[in-house]
Amino acid sequence: MADKVTSREEGKEYVLKNAKEHDVKFIRLWFTDILGMLKSFAITVEELEGALEQGMGFDGSSIEGFARIDESDMVAMPDPDTFQLLPWRPREHNAVARMFCDILRPGGEPFEGDPRYVLKRNLERAADKGYTFYVGPELEYFYFKDSNDTQGLDAGGYFDMTPLDAATDLRRETVLTLEEMGIPVEYSHHEVAASQHEIDMRYTDALTMADNVMTYRLVVKQIALKSGFYATFMPKPVFGINGSGMHVHQSLFKGDANAFFDGKDEYHLSKVARSYIAGILRHAPEITAVTSQWVNSYKRLVPGYEAPVYLSWARRNRADLIRVPEYQPGNEKATRIEFRSPDPACNPYLAFSVMLAAGLEGIEKEYEAPEPVQENVYEMSEEERQRRGIGTLPASLWEAIQLTEESELVRKALGDHVFRAFISNKKIEWDQYRTQVTQYEIKKYLPIL
């Protein structure tokens, strides 16, 4: 729905009216667990009015990072602003719609383990300072023949205009489906690696965008599946070629004014923007477990494949962690920063939360941004980087977990419940990974040891 409703009552009426007009029979109630996995259960239209009034109860004990067995009763409260028909389901008769939900405790208070609530809390902190947080993530992904193997659908490269093949049609249908669901798209193009693609959604407020990211990932996969193919947001599915990132363009606005813009500055960046950059640079290592949350994420974060690993910022250079895009120099609305380390398999609610928390910390404590780097950081010697104080991101999930576990900033941003559950989950993942014997080891060591 294009316009936000002015009250919950109006929202409820809007949803009931639309459900009737479009002959909706089923409504899927969507929410995520702490890892950003989309969860859903369906109600029939007969239950819709009651669900909008009181929410729908469900058992949260089996949802990752939610509740223990002895406190498992949860309530999913649909957000009327997020009502949309699912275009890939029947249209004319017994249509299916979806709504994102806020998760509540049975007494009606927000459940602190709900990632959507975590983001809302962080956005309130920004709002208390007069800021609205806008983001524009660029999610890359691969198309493969199926989920068992990494055989691609094309051999194209960056911005290639490939002949009409399966991938071209999949991308086109995905864009049309997203727009039908009220998600505006700015660009779609072939990415650097073979069979790698990107569709960029138009910049909007962070809560709407986190919902949009969840919808986008499902739509990309759904359209591929319908054609018998597989789409993946795995950060590094193929050795030796670029992985998939989720570069996040971001800015803070005060009303209609971009708080990042200063026409007198050589980069058109305000003091607020520079302190925000300094906040992200200083806290990037400790938020990396959230923005790059899988063992596989760290196969992407290595030098040489466009993924940033060094804590630096620049205007042009894409090797840096933070880039200040120059597409429209001096345009106030377009002034923003681009944070390049997150990948598209993160939980967007938590990732946007920790980015914002790091940036706000920089603003509150008036951090000074270092000088931007003009040279290619990858080509500097280790001594040169040390001399200039250019640190690095963690090189493995284990390193990242250790930094996050010590981080007061992340604990505060996520809240104790999500923080503890997230760390615990990631430690289990690391243990499972490090005890595996891989094909690489068999091939390398078995013949010689």
Image: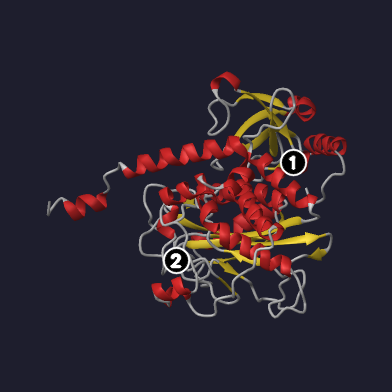
Viewer can see residue 202? no
Viewer can see residue 387? yes
Q: Position of residue 291 (x, y in %)?
A: 54, 52
Residue at image coords 45%, 47%? 402
Mark number displayed over residue 83: 1
Give neighbour class at mark 1: few <14, some 14-19, many 20+ (Cα, 10 Å).
Answer: many
Left-right relation of 264 to 318: right
Q: In this view of the protein, which residue sits in the foreground, 352 or 8?
A: 352
Mark number displayed over residue 29: none
Give neighbour class at mark 2: few <14, some 14-19, many 20+ (Cα, 10 Å).
Answer: many
Secondary structure beneath label 1: loop
Q: Position of residue 325 (x, y in %)?
A: 64, 72
Of pointers 1 and 2, the one earlier in the residue sequence: 1
Instruction: State the image quarter where residue 203 is shown.
Output: bottom right
Q: CA distance from mark 1 to mark 2?
A: 36 Å
Left-right relation of 7 to 119: right
Rendered position, 84 above or below 67 = below
Q: Amino acid at mark 2?
A: Ala
Q: In this view of the protein, which residue sits in the foreground, 160 or 186?
A: 186
Q: Position of residue 89 (x, y in %)?
A: 64, 41
Left-right relation of 153 to 340: left
Residue at image coords 71%, 57%? 364
Q: Amino acid at mark 1?
A: Phe
Q: In this view of the protein, which residue sits in the foreground, 303 or 234?
A: 303
Q: Position of residue 204 (x, y in %)?
A: 72, 57
Residue to which mark 2 is pinned? 193
Label 1 with label 2: CB-CB less than 8 Å: no
Secondary structure beneath label 2: loop
Rendered position, 195 above or below 329 = above
